[in-house]
Structures are given as C-alpha cells and as structure tokens.
C-alpha cells in the first residue's frame, strides 16, 4: 500500500508541476480565444442569414463562452490543490462559486433588451443586479477569508504526515480522471439539449446545472472521505467542527446551483458566512490556546 501511494505521489508531482500546469493553462486560454471567435461567427450567421435564424442572439452572448473555459481552469486548479491544506481548498471553492455567479451576469446580459428603458419593474434588470450584488459580496468574503488564512498561516499546525499528503495526491489524481469523464459526458448531454432547444428556440439548458451540479455533488463525498481519513492521523473536537463546517459549505454551494434567484445567492452567502465564522473561531481558539 505504501509503495502504491508513493507511486501515485510521484506521478502527481510529475504530471502537475508548475511547468505542466502552465501548459494546461495556455491550452485552455487558446481554446477560450478560439471558442470566443467561433461563437461570434455563429451569432453573426444567426443575425444575418434566415437559415440560421434560430442562432440569432446578442453578440454579448459570446462573452459567456470564453469565460466558461476560464472557469473550467479554476475547477481544474481546485482539484489539484486537494493535497494542500483544507483551508486553501475551501478558499478555491469560494473562488469557483464566485466566478460561476459572475458568469451568470454574462449569460443574462445577452438576454437583456438594451433598447428598453431601465426600471426596477423589469425582472431581467433585477436579475442582473442580483448577479452583480452577489458576486461583489462573495468577492469581499473571499478576500476576508484569505486574509484570515494568510494572517494565521503559520498556525496551520497540523503538520500533515507525509502519508496523508500522499493519500490526498491519490484522491486528486482520481478526481482529475472524474473531471475529464464528467466534462466529456456533460458536454455531450449539453450539446443534445442545446440542439433540441435551438430547434424550438426555447427551453435552453441552465448553464449552472451542466457539469457543475454533478461536480459539486462529487466534491461533497470527496470532502467527507478526506475528513474521515484525516481522523486516523489527527483528531480533536475543534478540527472536526472546522472540517465539518467546510463540508456543510460545499453542500450549500451544491444546493444553490439548482435554486432560482435570489434564493440561490442567499444560500451561497449563508455557506460563505458559516464557513468564514467557523474558520475565524477556530483560528481565534488556536491563538488563544498558544498564549
């Protein structure tokens, strides 16, 4: 078993070195640029040729596509930092859900009629305000979270045993495989749903339920698995509560993906605040204990 973990750890270090990660980043950025141009071309065809009339959209819709690739890269980073501290892992989850919220603005703005007068009775305008307001609050809470984390970074005392880090690297490798399979199957399902929607020009699939709903569902069980495994190396009431609060946050983030606005943002902010408060109290208790 130890030999297997060592092999997995070595493979992880080899596959996901800073140089390899940079190559993946450049690949996704090129894909983002290509998809952006392609989407603009498709919209142009839809806006100027009757044969492609079901593809008719605002050009602003194209912004959503490259942003999805950037978001996917952030999800990839979320998976490969699993071997790091759980605090950093949760911080990256905050970043991902904040970007999902910001992406919703790019999705919704394309459906907003810029020719109509702006007023608070317009549901589309209210939806945009929800996106902007929620994303800026999430950004503030994420900054606050990292401020607490970095200020007390030296207090991350649980010097994780090498074996536990190797286990987390194995989990990370497994999640990379899951991520690839989930990406392919989700893209295939989304393509079928989109083709059906284009035929009738309605019932377009919810972008947040494509891929991210399943991904966050899997992450809940990964969090629980790592929590249980961690008990074999170190355990205390305060560590259990902190890690359990992070799992609760992941569950709330998953719930928010299938709930309508503005309640989905309320659920997300509750998750952020709960995790932030428990993390702050854990740090505060640790500092007081050292004194």
Image (spheres, rainbow, N blue to C red):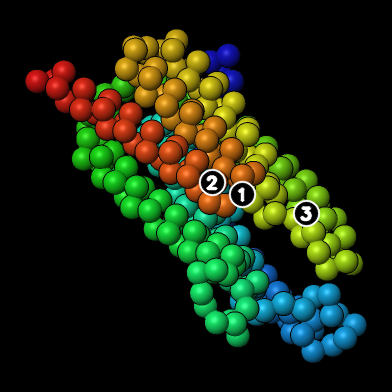
Residue, x 42% and y 26% (percent of image)? 245
On the picture, is 12 further left or further right than 236? right
Q: Is residue 12 visible?
A: no
Instruction: Choose the circle earlier in sequence order: 3 or 1.
Output: 3
Tag 2: Cα neighbours inside 10 Å, few (<14), some, or many (≥20)?
few
Which residue is the site of mark 2? 263
On the picture, is 230 further left or further right than 65? left
- Disc 3 is placed on an element classified as helix
Query: In the image, which disc is placed on residue 270?
Result: none
Q: Please state, as top left, top right, bottom left or bottom right, where the C terminus lies in the image.
A: top left
- Disc 2 is placed on an element classified as helix
Q: Position of residue 96 (x, y in %)?
A: 50, 49
* Cα distance between the residues tagged 3 and 1: 20 Å
On the picture, is 135 further left or further right than 170? left
Tag 3: Cα neighbours inside 10 Å, few (<14), some, or many (≥20)?
some
Query: In the image, which disc is placed on residue 190?
Result: 3
* Cα distance between the residues tagged 2 and 1: 6 Å
* Cα distance between the residues tagged 2 and 3: 25 Å
Q: Please state, as top left, top right, bottom left or bottom right, where the N terminus lies in the image.
A: top right
On the picture, is 40 further left or further right than 93? right
Q: Position of residue 31 (x, y in %)?
A: 64, 66
Residue, x 43% and y 38% (percent of image)? 270
Q: Position of residue 115 (x, y in %)?
A: 60, 85
Outermost bottom residue = 48
Outermost left residue = 291
Q: Nearer the viewer, mark 2 or mark 3?
A: 2
Mark 2 touches mark 1? (CB < 8 Å): yes
Which residue is the site of mark 1? 260
Q: Is residue 200 visible?
A: yes
Residue in front for this viewpoint, 16 or 79 = 79
- Disc 1 is placed on an element classified as loop
């Amino acid at each position: 078993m130890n030999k297997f973990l060592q092999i997995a750890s070595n493979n992880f270090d080899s596959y996901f070195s800073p140089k390899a990660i940079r190559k993946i980043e450049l690949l996704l950025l090129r894909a983002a640029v290509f998809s952006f141009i392609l989407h603009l071309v498709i919209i142009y065809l839809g806006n100027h040729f009757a044969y492609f009339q079901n593809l008719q959209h605002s050009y602003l819709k194209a912004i959503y596509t490259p942003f999805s690739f950037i978001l996917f890269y952030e999800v990839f980073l979320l998976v490969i930092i699993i071997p790091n501290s759980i605090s950093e892992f949760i911080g990256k989850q905050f970043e991902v859900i904040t970007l999902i919220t910001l992406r919703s603005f790019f999705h919704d703005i394309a459906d907003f009629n810029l020719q109509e007068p702006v007023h608070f009775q317009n549901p589309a305008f209210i939806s945009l305000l929800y996106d902007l307001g929620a994303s800026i609050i999430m950004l503030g809470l994420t900054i606050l979270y990292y401020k607490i984390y970095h200020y007390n970074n030296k207090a991350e005392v649980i010097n994780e045993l090498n074996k536990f880090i190797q286990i987390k690297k194995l989990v990370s490798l497994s999640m990379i495989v899951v991520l690839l399979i989930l990406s392919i199957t989700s893209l295939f399902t989304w393509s079928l749903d989109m083709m059906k929607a284009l035929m009738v020009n309605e019932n377009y699939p919810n972008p947040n339920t494509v891929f991210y709903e399943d991904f966050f569902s899997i992450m809940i069980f990964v969090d629980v698995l790592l929590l249980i495994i961690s008990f074999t190396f170190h355990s205390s009431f305060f560590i259990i509560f902190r890690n359990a609060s992070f799992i609760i946050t992941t569950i709330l983030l998953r719930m928010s993906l299938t709930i309508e606005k503005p309640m989905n943002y309320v659920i997300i902010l509750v998750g952020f605040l709960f995790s932030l408060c428990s993390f702050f109290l854990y740090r505060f208790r640790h500092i007081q204990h050292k004194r």
